[in-house]
Image (tube, rainbow, N blue to C red):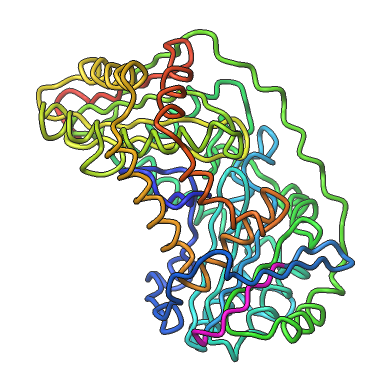
Amino acid sequence: MNKQHTRFWTRGALGLVAVTCVAASAMSGVAPQPAAADVAASPPRPLDALVIVRERLPNGLRVVLNPDRSVPTVGIAVYYDVGSRNEVQGRSGFAHLFEHMMFQGSANVGKGEHFVIITNRGGSMNGTTSEDRTNYYETLPSNELELGLWLEADRMRSLAITAENFENQRAVVMDERRQSYENQPYGASFLRANALAYGDYWPYAHSTIGDMQDLVNAPLSAVQEFWQEHYAPNNAVLSVAGDFDPAEAMTLIRRHFEDIGSREVPAYAPPAFQAQTAERRDQMEDPLADLPALHINFHIPASQEPDHAALEMLSLILGHGDSSRLYRGLVYDREVVTDISASTDDRRGPDLFSIFALMAEGHTPAEVEALVYAEIERIARDGVQDRELQRVRNQVRAYFLFSQQSNLDRARNLAEFEMYQGDANLIRGDLDRYLAITAADIQRVAGQYFAATNRSVLHVMPVAGGAP
């Protein structure tokens, strides 16, 4: 599993937030190998050179096209505006379940055939689920564009939600939860830390992977209703990037998608988020852990709020990579932890600034806590050095350009901008938002969002005597 950020960097070790479906593993027991169409990638190019065409079909499907004839491949991404935040209590895990169900066949595609067809044509494919959306994507040789569109349209129109497919994939998801969280050292602690931070704010307090008992109790009728409500063209974005003619691509898109009927989609109406007013603190034992670990979460604004970019830059300075302050100070200099990372979680709604640390032998979470808080306070008091700011600006620029290189990366990025912000063209100004962040901005947010009353702390302790 991996976390897919809106941004261009990923969390440190065990950033288990988004759930990735490797379709081949569920069907053949092996992970798909990189295909030839994945290997070729376009060279970095200025964002103002991107050609972005936006359309909307009569059934509400939003379409984003990014033609680039430099490499003979196409990336296709379909984003559905449904994630675990859309689930109701007692029905957690449905969005992730459908990430698996969408590979189980449709009117004209047999069970497991989506993967076989794509790989046999030299392509690759996958899907991921987060709190805020579900996506499916393919890379194909450019002469197979229509094939990819036909496959996506067929499962949007006529997914096979049968009792057999449901029971099979429910078992797969439950096994995935065991393997990825319950049977992994520190895995369950990420779920516990997230629930502690969000409290009774259901959209983000529960896990994307789903509660085991909710999965056991889920009836087929509820699963069918979830698909009917959310997997409609008027709740989706289709993005295509690569070697194609826009007019020809739109002809194909209309041919395969325009007759799919729109449906009434429930409005996302989350409860009001109540600001935290006192520190939350907990401790758990992990029988699989060899060393103690520490989670610290601070509440911060949603990913598109003005201060979020400065907080992201702060996370890079504090805990991204070997040259970050916390890594240098606590891993190299003091040798009190073996690993530490800091990141924003990049949710569309109320977000978290997350710190995770794995203790070195003989050191405690309480000891490391104090050192982390002292470093944040030092930035709030003294600011950051010019060379630190330049380093993270260089990182952001490099990550951003790298994230636009392949046709598939651009297809996914453009789909997400269209869905989250309402206009894929806004990607052009996103890098500038980060490069405009000043040292004063970072110092200000370091002093604004890290009060003790705004944090949740989880200590993870090994069981005495070690793992069984």
Above or below for 378 versus 262: above
User: Residues in magenta?
Assistant: 64-72
Q: Nearer the viewer, residue 314 or 117?
A: 314
Query: Percent position (x, y) of residue 287?
Result: 26, 31
Residue 360 visible in the current orientation: yes
Query: Percent position (x, y) of residue 440?
Result: 43, 27
Residue 468 visible in the current orientation: no
Residue drawn at x 61%, y 34% as measured from the top left: 305
In this picture, residue 188 sits left or right of residue 119: left
Q: Is residue 98 magenta?
A: no
In this picture, residue 79 sits left or right of residue 386: right
Quick one: quadrant of the C terminus? Answer: top left
Image quadrant where residue 76 sits:
bottom right
Image quadrant where residue 424 sits:
bottom right
Query: Percent position (x, y) of residue 47?
Result: 55, 64
Residue drawn at x 78%, y 79% as measured from the top left: 256
In this picture, residue 400 sits left or right of residue 255: left
Image quadrant where residue 464 sits:
top left
Q: Nearer the viewer, residue 341 or 287?
A: 341
Residue reaching furthest to the top? 278
Above or below for 44 versus 378: below
Query: Percent position (x, y) of residue 135?
Result: 60, 59
Residue drawn at x 38%, y 57% as measured from the top left: 398
Above or below for 247 versus 385: below
Above or below for 190 versus 406: above
Residue drawn at x 50%, y 56% as measured from the top left: 172
